[in-house]
Amino acid sequence: MLGYEKTSDTQRSEASKQSEVGYKNMSLEINDRDLELRIKGHLYEIRETNGEVMGGEQGYPMAERGYQSTLQSVASCANEEVLDAVADHIKDRMRNTGERPENRKVRRTARKLVSEAGYPPNQYLNRA
């Protein structure tokens, strides 16, 4: 055979579970229910701000996934104050520019805020 290994159904299901967690859910060791609810609340507020400023949902679901990943990343390596600051930054940028901020720019700002608060940024934030 061409160097391919035969994989069992169990191995495939484990691999698919890991890939699903990777981008879609990105649960970065957030075991605190309060933080999870705080992130969901911020995402709701960001969605509302998007509706007010942009007047529609076109393109928003993809942006929201990026914002969610960034907020979860911040929550996993910093405190609630930094998380709130990053979410406020997203909402303020939408209001001030009339556009959604690119997630890469949001991650850069998040990395800066995390560092300024004295926490080491994680790999996700450092890739921005």
Image (cartoon, rainbow, N blue to C red):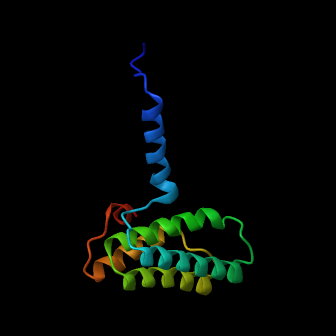
State the image quarter where residue 124 is shown: bottom left
Quadrant showing the C terminus: bottom left
Q: How many marks on residues? A: 0
Q: Is residue 26 above or below residue 48?
A: above
Residue 112 coordinates in the image, percent (x, y):
35, 77
Q: Is residue 21 above or below residue 11?
A: below
Residue at 56%, 75% (x, y): give it: 43
State the image quarter where residue 34 is shown: bottom left
Residue 92 in sight from this viewpoint: yes
Task: Work out whether residue 49 or residue 80 is closer to the camera in this orientation and state it.
Answer: 80
Quadrant showing the N terminus: top left
View extreme (right): residue = 55
Residue 119 coordinates in the image, percent (x, y):
26, 76
Residue 98 in sight from this viewpoint: no
Task: Work out whether residue 127 or residue 3 is closer to the camera in this orientation and state it.
Answer: 3
Task: Work out whether residue 104 or residue 63 is closer to the camera in this orientation and state it.
Answer: 63
Q: Is residue 24 above or below residue 79?
A: above
Residue at 52%, 56% (x, y): give it: 24
Residue 103 coordinates in the image, percent (x, y):
50, 68
Residue at 70%, 83% (x, y): give it: 52
Residue at 45%, 72% (x, y): give it: 71
Residue 59 coordinates in the image, percent (x, y):
67, 64
